Image: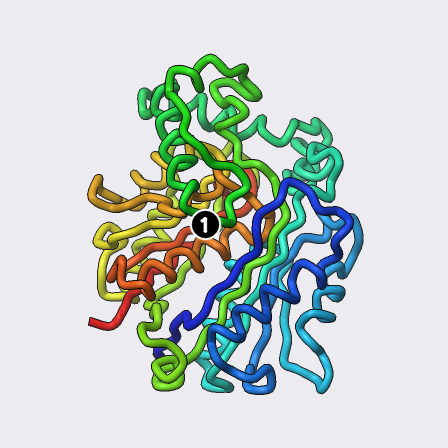
Amino acid sequence: MREVGVVAFAQSDCLAANRRDDMADILAPVIAAAVAEAGVDRGEIDFHCSGSHDFHEGRTFAYIESLDAVGAWPPISESHVEMDAAWAVNEAWSWLQLGEGDIALVYGIGRGSLARDADQVSHTMLDPYYLSPLRPHRHALAGLQAQALLAAGAIGEADLAATVARSLADAEANPHAQRSGRYDVFDLLTAPYVASPLREHDVAPLGDAAAVLVLATGDRARELAERPAWIRAMDHRMDTHYPGSRDLTRLETVELAAGRASAMAGFAASEVDVAELHTEYSHAEPLLADALGLGRDVVLNPSGGPLAGNPTTATGLIRIGEAAARIRSGEADRALAHATSGPALQHNMVSLLEGDG
C-alpha cells in the first residue's frame, strides 16, 4: 500500500440558497485556495475526481459545468461519482494506490437548495416499486428510524436536543457554518415536530457549498505539507435499499466497514481522538457512535457537523477534510471520518486518518 495523505483542504461558506451562482462560480475560488495551500501548479495534478447529484441539479451530466473551474484543457485525467464526493475521495485514493500518479484533486459541489421542493427529489432514491410511488416526505424514514431508537430505549428526546445544542455551539468557531449559536435544551424541546420525534433543528439544513481536497503520496506529500493527514484506510458497505428489511436500530454496514478499515489501518476506530460523522439527523450521532464503538473521550463533530450545514453531495467530503484538518493542525493524532448516502444511513463509508508520530 502506498502512503496517501491529505495535504490541503478548502471549502466555501455553506449558504441557504444561491441559485444565481453556477457550479464554476462557487467552485473556482475553492479550487484556487486548495491548490495554493498545497503549493502545486495545476499541471502537476495527475488525477481529478468529483461528486455531485443530477437529481438535485435537475439535469443530466450537470457536473460537466464544474470542469470550467477545473480547467479541462490541455486534457486531464478525470472521473466523477454520482453521489457524495466522499466516494470520489475513495476513488482517488484507490487510483493513487495504482502508482499512476502522485497528486490528486477531489472536489464536491453541493447545491441542495436548487430543488424548490426537496420532497420531489428525495423519494427517487427509494425502492421504485413499493416505496417511491408512496412519495414519503424526505424526513419520513429518518423519523421512523429515530422513533425505533426511542422505542428501544436507546435515546430520548432530550438526548437529541443536547446533541443539537452542542453541535451548534461548536459551529460558532466554524466560519463556514450555515447555522450556529447557543441554545437551551429545554427551549429546543418545545419546537414542533417535522417527523416525530424529530424537530426542525434535528434536521441538517440543506445548503450550497463546495469543498476541495488535495491528496498526495509518500515523500511528495511530505514536501507539500508539514504534517500530512495520512488516510490509513477506507472501506464502504451498502445495506438493502428496502428499509423494511433492516433493523433500523443497528448499523451493521458501519460495523463491517469500521472492522475492515481497522484491520487495514492497524488501529481500531474506537482509538481515534476525533470523529467527524455524517449526521444529517440528530439521532444518527448516538447510533453511529455506538456502531463505531466511540467512547466519551472521542470528540464528535468539533466543526459542528452537518447539523450546522448540509451541502448535499459535499457533506461527506467535508467530514474527511475536517478530520484531516485536526490532524494537520496537531490537535489530533488519529481521526475518523464517516460518510453516508441513501435513506436511514443505507450506504456507509469509514475512513481512518493518522498523523506522523
> What percent of the width, then of the height, locates residue 154?
32, 25
Label 1 Cα neighbours within 10 Å, binned few <14 / some 14-19 / many ≥20: many
Query: Does 242 sit above or below residue 229?
Result: above
> What percent of the width, then of the height, locates residue 136?
66, 27
**Image-quadrant location for residue 194:** top right
> In screen coordinates, is 226 left or right of 124?
left
Count of labels in the image: 1
Badge 1 is on which residue? Answer: 348
* Residue located farthest toward the right when viewing the structure as drawn: 59
* Residue located farthest toward the top when viewing the structure as drawn: 190
**Image-quadrant location for residue 224:** bottom left
Quick one: SS at disc 1?
strand
Query: Does 256 sit above or below residue 243?
Result: below
Query: Does 306 sit above or below residue 236?
Result: above
Tell me the residue at 57%/78% (across/down). Answer: 47
The front one of 346 and 28 is 28
The front one of 257 and 310 is 310
> In screen coordinates, is 115 left or right of 219?
right
> What percent of the width, then of the height, locates residue 233?
35, 65
Image quarter hosting the C terminus: bottom left
Image color mode: rainbow
Image quarter hosting the N terminus: bottom left
> What percent of the width, then of the height, locates residue 101?
50, 85
Label 1 is placed on what type of residue? Answer: Asn
Tell me the residue at 24%/62% (across/down). Answer: 333
Tell me the residue at 32%/40% (across/down). Answer: 289
Tell me the residue at 60%/57% (across/down). Answer: 210
